[in-house]
Amino acid sequence: MIDRILILAIVVVAVAAVWSVIQLWSKIKIQQLQKGTPLSAIIPTGKPAVVSFSTPSCRDCRTLQAPALARLKAGLHDRVTILSLSALEHPDLVDTLGILTVPSTVVVDAKGAIKALNLGYASDAKLIEQLNMTTA
C-alpha cells in the first residue's frame, strides 16, 4: 500500500514539474517575442486580437476551442480581432511562436505585442481575462 502511495506521489510531482517547465518556457518565449512579433503581418493593429491555431484532425479544436472563440466574438463584437489559422499551413509561424500543440491561442494587444501564449484549450473566460490584461 505504501508503495502505491509513493508511486502516486512521484507521478504527481513529475506532472507538476513538467507543467511548471511548460509554463516557464511559455513566459520566456513571450518575452523573446516582445522584440518583434511575427503576427504583425497578418493581424491589424489598433485593437486586441486572439489568434487560434488548429489542425483539421484536432477534435478539441472543433469541439472546445472553436465554440469558445465564437462566444468570445459574440461577447466582444468588433472590439477584438479573432483569427483562426491552420498550424499545418503556417509551419514557420508555429515554429517561431513555439506552438507545441493544438489548439493553441495567442493573445495580442492593440499595439501588436504578444501578451499570452496558451498551449492547449483556452476558455473564452480565460481569453477575456488575458485581453483585459492587455487593455489595462
Image (spheres, rainbow, N blue to C red):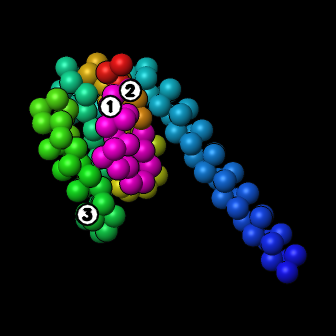
In this image, 71 relative to 101: left or right? left
Q: Pointer 3: what residue?
A: 62
Q: Could you say whether the residue bearing mark 3 is in a helix, strand or loop?
A: helix
Decide if residue 13 is in sight here: yes
Q: Pointer 2: what residue?
A: 133
Q: How far apart are marks 3 and 2 (CA)?
A: 26 Å
In this image, 84 relative to 33: left or right? left
Amino acid type of the residue tagged 3 in the rendering? Arg
Quarter of image, res 41: top left
Binning the other alpha carbons within 10 Å of mark 2 as few (below 14), some (14 to 19) or many (20 upward) gives few
Q: State the mark number for residue 131.
A: 1
Q: Distance between the residues labelled 1 and 3?
A: 22 Å
Residue 99, percent across and down? 43, 47
Going 37% across and 49% down the picture, which residue do you hit? Answer: 122
Of labels 3 and 2, earlier in sequence is 3
Residue 84, percent across and down? 22, 48
Q: How far apart are marks 2 and 1 (CA)?
A: 5 Å
Amino acid type of the residue tagged 2 in the rendering? Met
- Image vertical order of residue 126 relative to residue 109, above or below: below
Residue 101, percent across and down? 43, 55
Residue 85, percent across and down? 24, 48
Q: Are marks 1 and 3 in contact (CB under 8 Å)?
A: no
- Image vertical order of residue 67 relative to residue 81, above or below: below
Going 69% across and 51% down the picture, which residue do you hit? Answer: 17
Q: Are marks 2 and 1 in contact (CB under 8 Å)?
A: yes
Of labels 1 and 3, earlier in sequence is 3
Amino acid type of the residue tagged 1 in the rendering? Leu
Magenta run includes residue 118:
yes
Q: Could you say whether the residue bearing mark 2 is in a helix, strand or loop?
A: helix
In this image, 104 relative to 25: left or right? left
Residue range corresponding to the magenta coloring: 117-133
